[in-house]
Image (cartoon, rainbow, N blue to C red):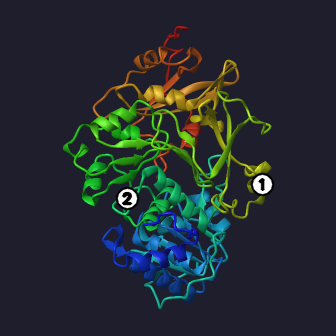
Amino acid sequence: MDVLLEPPLRAIPELLERRASELGDRPLLVIGERSLGYRAMRDLAAGYAGTLAAAGVRPGDRVAVMAENCFELLALWSGCAWLGAILVPINTASRGAQLEHVLGNSGPKALAVEAGLLAHVAAVERLPTELERLWLIGEGGRPLRGLEPEPFPEPQAPAPRGEVGPADTLAILYTSGTTGPSKGVCCPQAQFYWYAVNTAAMLEISEDDVLYTCLPLFHINALSTFVQALVHGARCVIGPRFSASQFWSRLAESEATVTYILGAMTSILAKTAASPADGAHRVRVVLAPATPERLHELFRERFGVTLLDGYAMTETNVVIGPRDGEQRPGYMGRLLPGFDVRIVDEEDVEVPDGTAGELVMRADEPFAFATGYWRMPERTVEAWRNLWFHSGDRVIRTEDGYFRFVDRIKDAIRRRGENISAWEVEQVLQSHHDVAAAAVIPVPSELGEDEVMAWVVPREGGQVDPLELVKHCEHRLAHFAIPRYVELLAELPLTENGKVRKFVLRERGVTAATWDREAAGYTPARR
């Protein structure tokens, strides 16, 4: 099978048409109790495009959905793709002012909501004036500001394929908004195609693979997993949200050969108790960006899988990763074909190899990156200044072309005139055998600048002594990077993608429960 599909089928409708004619009833999608083949998926897209059109949705209109991973979300995504409308999948954790901003900024004409989440929409003070239809996924629900909830609609008579091109926005995916209002990333049709092609090239996906994801469909990673299957003739299984205790057994049940994890998931899985399910699966490779170096061998020996690192953003594509099967644990990888990157200083001047700076990127292929932020032109210009997308990530490039992540620029800590990478401190903390997860933030110092604070989750059955943990850091970190403050938590506040919601920890800061090594009279030795 020609996985590059020459010429590239960069718009989803023509990709659906091609695959339906080639693969017919071959299994494509399993989600919950539903399963669809390639032809059925094409028909579903056309049917839900008919549903949207009958509801008054026109090309360019937005259709929002707030739900956990479910068939209905992908039905709307495919219908929007076919019609030329824009899907706005909303993070199920959104509440209050953030949810009101997302709805007001996107201005959807129709909104589909999981019944259990409707109360959060009802609590929003102002709903968008554009909203005309409210569809309920599940049972229950009361009228919402004059809108009567309707049962989620069935597909109607197939609509003709819209005049949809590679540049047309298919989805608006909202950022976490930790430094201001959430930004709606405008993801064009072609971005999904190239995201799937580039990711699958790293994972060596073929039509024999079963791709499993438990990541949420309101982020690009999971949506891309479905498109990877579509492009390469594989099968995609969409599972419920991540559970460390059920992760490997769910993979076995799905017959998965490829899966995807993010953020703290890797460390959490590494600290789980041994189980017969650890190796009772068919998975051969796991895409696991930002994996600590020490965990690659552990996953290979204990779980029998290869972890692949890489670098991508919602605004960009899979830009950095293993090339030609070469991977260096602890590094994101090398520049992938089709992209250009630089490491620059505050003035956008390129810095020498070995020097930390901001990673900026651009793509060779048209519309392989997002086209900007919805209704935020100033933020778009700021992020894409000088015609390079600015990642906000501090990165180092080695002389032989490997890239190493240092930290998010906004997460950098400045203490006693020294710059500290929160990410590097977290890796040392998580190397302790009794630590399941850790997050490091700056907190104000009495002397100005910052102090280092660590939030630590003990592994199941383990106990963490803050003093012993600080001593564990002494031989592994510069003295100025060793945390002054340590607080133990049962769990870290995580996004649905497994990333730590650090703004929650920053707002909390030092508490009465925080251990302070200076108050304890301990000073790390300078080594």
Rendered location of residue 326, percent (x, y): 47, 39
Please determine whether, in this image, residue 170 is positioned above or below residue 449. Answer: below
Residue 343 found in image quarter: top right
Camera-side residue: 205 or 273? 205
| Residue 240 visible in the current orientation | no
Q: Nearer the viewer, mark 2 or mark 1?
A: 2
Rendered location of residue 417, percent (x, y): 70, 19
Q: Earlier in the sequence, mark 2 or mark 1?
A: 2
Mark sitting on residue 41: none
Residue visible at 38% across and 75% down in the picture: 23
Residue visible at 48% across and 42% down in the picture: 309
134 vs 409, left or right, is left
Residue tagged 1: 381
Alpha-carbon distance for marks 2 and 1? Answer: 36 Å
Residue, far left = 276
Q: Residues within 10 Å of mark 2 (few under 14, many from 20)?
A: many
Q: Residues within 10 Å of mark 1 (few under 14, many from 20)?
A: some
The kind of secondary structure element at disc 2 is strand
Rendered location of residue 472, percent (x, y): 43, 18
Residue, far bottom = 157
In the picture, the quarter occupied by the N terminus is bottom left
502 vs 115, left or right, is right
| Residue 2 visible in the current orientation | yes
The kind of residue tagged 1 is Val
Please determine whether, in this image, residue 152 is positioned above or below residue 324. Answer: below
Please determine whether, in this image, residue 163 is positioned above or below residue 102. Answer: below
Residue visible at 38% across and 64% down in the picture: 234
Residue tagged 2: 211
84 vs 305, left or right, is right
